[in-house]
Amino acid sequence: MAGYDASRQSRNVIHDLLDGSIGVSFIAPRPRSGDLVTVYTDRAEAFAAYALYAEETSFTYTSGDVTELGMTFVLDGSLDIEAEAIDEEQTVWYVRVGYQEV
């Protein structure tokens, strides 16, 4: 993994009460959403991942290093692929997945 960001959107409902105060209906926030970036040194593997994430299914991400990143998610938003030339002989490929945890 080359990058990860996450946010959780509140679903609390704020009520303006007649006496001028505020009432709140507490609702658990939505699951995480954001961008997951995976990195590849092989072009074919990068394009295979790019095609995989475009499928109409959910995915499971696990990390042996950071277990908190583990999740089941679906594509939500943008799916991008980008190449970065490290030198004349080596290119690194990044696949960025906009995700919604489910």
Image (cartoon, rainbow, N blue to C red):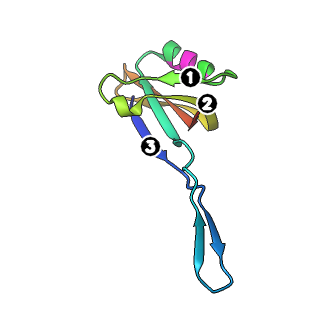
Mark 3 or 1, closer to the camera: 1
The label on residue 74 is 2
Q: Nearer the viewer, residue 84 or 79?
A: 79
Q: Secondary structure at mark 3?
A: strand
**Contact (Cβ within 8 Å) of mark 2 with mark 1:** yes
Residue 54 quadrant: top right
Q: Residue sitting at 55 percent across and 52 percent down? A: 9
Using a 10 Å C-alpha cutoff, classify the residue at mark 2 as few (fewer than 14 neighbours), some (14 to 19) or many (20 or more): many
- Farthest front residue in view: 19
Dot 1: element: strand
- The quadrant in which the C terminus is found is top right
The span from disc 2 to disc 1 (Cα, nearest Å) is 6 Å
**Residue 100 pos. (x, y %):** 58, 37
Q: Which residue sits furthest top? A: 44
Kindly identify the amino acid type of the residue bearing the numbered disc 2.
Answer: Val
The label on residue 5 is: 3
Q: Earlier in the sequence, mark 3 or mark 1?
A: 3
Q: Locate residue 97, reporting x and y percent.
A: 55, 33
Q: Main secondary structure of the magenta part?
A: helix
- Give the magenta range: 46-50
